[in-house]
Image (cartoon, helix red, strand yellow):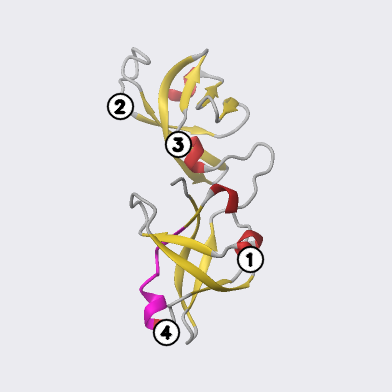
Amino acid sequence: MDLLVTGFIRSSHGLDGFVKAESVSGEVAHFADLEEVYLRPRGAEGPGKRYGIEAVEGSSALLLLKFRGIDSPEEAKALSGLEILVPPDKACPLNEDEWYVDDLCQCYLVYEGNPIGRITNVLEGGAGDLLEVTLSEGSDPEVSGGKTRLVPMRSEFIGNVDIEAKTVELMHRWILE
């Protein structure tokens, strides 16, 4: 089952089992349409545990969720720190030139058509997102394989992103030095 992380549970809220949640995209409108989600610890594999949604309240500043069967502050507190996952068709819609992190992390970084590394993560940087790339063996005689480099996700450094072909084009090789 393909699922996307769409948010995180921050803490419990109130006496009725509500939790404070944070959307990874900053958008929260799509939460109102959700009937169920999956919750799992950060970094864990697999879909996690399914929870029905009883109520969605608030805004991007304070998003509150109420799950079926979670009726006390203690039960809600036990969910703190968990990732909120949904099927891709239930996630926040993408705008042009936006991609899901999970999709980017399945791509290879290519230079002049040749794969030089695999994207392993997308990190938030002060001036924009950074692609974390693990370089392939033999991709560059001066840079040994297995090393990690960060590449700014900016048009000066990144060209065509083709999620279907699982490739992200690197514009300048020197950024890896």
Q: CA distance from mark 4 to mark 1?
A: 22 Å
- Quarter of the image where the C terminus is located: top left
Say above or below: 85 vs 110.
below
Question: Residue at image x 63%, y 29%?
Answer: 155
Earlier residue among tags 2 and 3: 3
User: Which residue type carries mark 4?
Assistant: Ser
- Of badges 4 and 3, the one in the foreground is 4
Earlier residue among tags 4 and 3: 4
Q: CA distance from mark 4 to mark 3?
A: 37 Å
**Residue beneath disc 2:** 146
Q: CA distance from mark 2 to mark 3?
A: 16 Å
Is 29 left, or right, of 73 in this rendering? right
Dot 2: element? loop
Say above or below: 96 vs 143.
below
Residue 105, label in figure: 3
**Residue beneath disc 4:** 72
Q: CA distance from mark 4 to mark 2?
A: 47 Å
Q: CB of mark 2 within 8 Å of CB of mark 3?
A: no
In this rendering, does residue 160 appear at all? yes
Q: Which residues are magenta?
A: 74-84
User: Which residue type carries mark 1?
Assistant: Ala
Q: Position of residue 165 (x, y in %)?
A: 53, 24
**Residue beneath disc 1:** 32
